[in-house]
Amino acid sequence: MSYYSTIGAFEFRSRFTEAELKEAFNRFVQNLTGEERDCMGIYEFSRISGPEKDGLYEYALEMGDYFAKHYADRYLAEFVSTVIALGEYALVEFDGEDGEKWGYLVLSNEVYDLAYETLVNGKPLHEFIDEKTKGKENFLEETIKQETKR
């Protein structure tokens, strides 16, 4: 079974030059298992700018198609955490073909899972529904029940 999702374009800043970033990526991928290694093959990075006055380079994810089977999503985030500059962050976000959303907050040497929750008027969806439906009568349903008893 396959699962497609779309990764959002993201950028990050690093002290690594382009050559150093490419070498770090290759070393990271080589330490993965065969299947994981293959899954990381869809990702590449391109330099947007740099070096800036602060010595940082800015990179962006480059893909031919951002809609793909992102089976190495966590590994991608973990790699970025190894090269992102201290004090910088990146959001790596995905939208699944079934509407599921997930992602990662990436800091230097740290990766945190992101969770998305649907809110209605500032309340979690399930709480809002409970407030609107628990103990409430459905007048149409009651009318139909009374009519069928006649």
Image: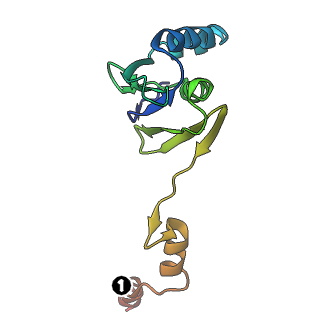
Please tell me in which quadrant of the rendered image residue 26 appears.
Answer: top right
Picture coordinates of residue 32, whole percent (x, y): 65, 13
Amino acid type, label 1: Leu
Please give the name of the residue rendered at 43% of the width and 22% of the height, measured from the top-left corner.
51
Which residue in the protein does label 1 denote? 140
Picture coordinates of residue 106, whole percent (x, y): 57, 37
Q: Is residue 147 above or below residue 6?
A: below
Secondary element at tag 1? helix
Please tell me in which quadrant of the rendered image residue 63 appears.
Answer: top left
In the displayed image of the protein, which residue is found farthest to the left?
64
Picture coordinates of residue 44, whole percent (x, y): 43, 16
Please give the name of the residue rendered at 62% of the width and 9% of the height, measured from the top-left corner.
27
Q: Is residue 62 in view?
A: no
Nearer the observer, 45 or 88: 88
Q: Is residue 56 above or below residue 29?
A: below
Q: Is residue 88 left or right of residue 111?
A: left
Q: Is residue 128 in view?
A: yes
